[in-house]
Amino acid sequence: YGARMTGAGFGGCTVALVRTEQVPAYVERASAAYEARTGLRARFHVCQVVDGAGEVVG
């Protein structure tokens, strides 16, 4: 698990790999820290990994 900066051309973004059960706590802590430091509210887009493309037979 970890995080990295990306998309600096769009004002800066991070991508973080977080266990599903830890997402709410991560969002709360990261949001509070970001707002305290910048005075801005962070936006989060929570995604899940799923199977990739496959062949449709039939």
Image (cartoon, rainbow, N blue to C red):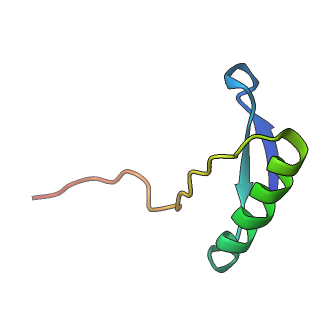
- Where residue 2 appears, as percent x and y from the top left, is 82, 58
Q: Position of residue 46 (x, y in %)?
A: 56, 57
> Horizontal placement of 50 versus 15: left or right?
left
Residue 4 picture location, percent across and down: 81, 45
Which residue is located at x 76 percent, y 25 percent? 8
In this rendered view, identify the residue nearer to me: 36 or 30.
36
Q: Is residue 55 above or below residue 8?
A: below
Q: Please identify the quadrant where the N terminus is shown.
A: bottom right
Relative height, residue 13 to residue 44 (above, below): above
Residue nearer the viewer, 5 or 27: 27
- In terms of image quadrants, where is residue 28? bottom right
Name which residue lies at 73% across and 54% down. 16
x, y (%) of residue 11? Answer: 72, 26
**Is residue 28 depicted above or below 20 in this figure?**
above
| Residue 39 falls left or right of residue 43 | right
Q: Is residue 33 left or right of residue 24?
A: right
Q: How many marks?
A: 0
Q: Residue furthest bottom?
A: 21
To which quarter of the image does residue 22 belong? bottom right
Outermost residue to the top: 9
Residue at the extreme front of the image, as rendered: 39
Looking at this view, is 2 or 39 the one in front? 39
Question: Is residue 5 shown above or below 30?
Answer: above
Q: Classify the position of the C terminus by image quarter.
A: bottom left
Question: Hey, which residue is sitting farthest right in the picture?
Answer: 37
Residue under the image location 69 percent in, 46 percent down? 42
